[in-house]
Image: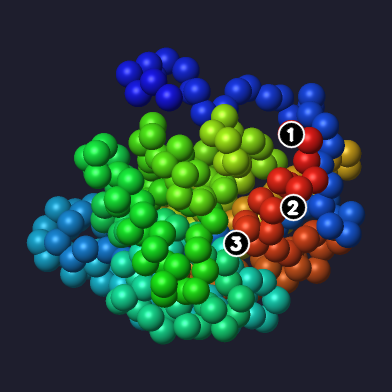
Amino acid sequence: MNQHDTTENELYDYSPIVDREPITWPGGARVAFYIGLNVEHFHLGKPSTSINAATASLVPDPLNHGWRDYGARVGIWRVMDTLDRHGIRASVLLNSDVCERYPQIIEAGNARGWTWLAHGKTNSELPAEIPAEAEREYLTEILETIEKATGHRPRGWMGPALNHTFQTPSLLAELGVSYLLDWTADDQPFRLKVPGLLSVPYSVELNDIGLFTMKSHTGPEFVRMLEDQLDQLCDDAADSGRVMALALHPFVIGQAFRNRYLDEALAYIAGHEGVWLTTSDEIADHFDRTAPA
């Protein structure tokens, strides 16, 4: 890919959803549903995802760092219980630094059959900040760290802040990654121009950070949005399957006062006719096997 020509997206072509061959999901399901659970580590002295911008540049920043830390200490365990209640396995977007710092989370996720995707090293560092000549080593270390800790080589990738460089997709494909979540351009998986690499839908709209901390939506509004999204996708999928992704962060959705709304939304989704409760790995595998090239 020409790194100096940024006028066009050379990673994929335009493809209107109405012009494609139909895709199908197992059991005749209309919608494949998965949860992208962001399990992340943040550096104490570097600004990152924050709930209060007024202190975000301070070092240390107890207000924002403590809020983020709540996810690994408390929120993740509350979310686990809720997912278990509805028989949903998470697709974990995993910073590789989590493996060393929070091994109990890895152990609990493995016991539940969670899927592990690579999500950079830490969410305080973006792939675009890595020197181009060091990117292969950076990606290799992330994948190998996660593989060693979980026992599973990640087959999916989502960059911190959905970020990557022009060369990242090709490097990931060479390292055995088979799909990306970074490009939130569709309701169906699609093939990228990098051989062997797919795009699987993710969401920046159905994302708890945006909904709760940026747009200040309430719990009942969150439930209604998920119900409306699923109902519409089921209607859209009368002739060809769709994907519904829900992006969650334990330090946001794992807050005690929000848990009842996650539980309510997942009860609706899990009880809805025509929904395949699955993982991003299984979506990518099924699409790759069954969809037209």
Secondary element under disc 2, as helix, strand or loop, is helix
Q: Is residue 236 left or right of residue 46?
A: right
Q: Secondary structure at mark 1?
A: loop
Which of the 4 quarters of the picture holds residue 65?
bottom left
Return the residue nearer the eye: 60 or 106.
106
Query: Looking at the image, do the residues carrying marks 1 and 3 touch, with CB atoms under 8 Å apart?
Result: no
Which image quadrant: the C terminus? top right
Q: Which residue is mark 2?
A: 286
Identify the residue at horizontal 61%, vertical 76% (top origin).
Answer: 113
- In the picture, the quarter occupied by the N terminus is top left
Q: Which residue is mark 1?
A: 293
**Residue nearest the observer in this picture, 235 or 99:** 99
- Sequence-wise, the earlier of marks 1 and 3 is 3
Q: Earlier in the sequence, mark 3 or mark 2?
A: 3
The amino acid marked with disc number 3 is Ile
Residue 211 lies, in percent from the top left, at: 49, 53
Q: Image point 41% across, 74% down: which residue?
A: 149
Q: Is residue 178 left or right of residue 50?
A: right
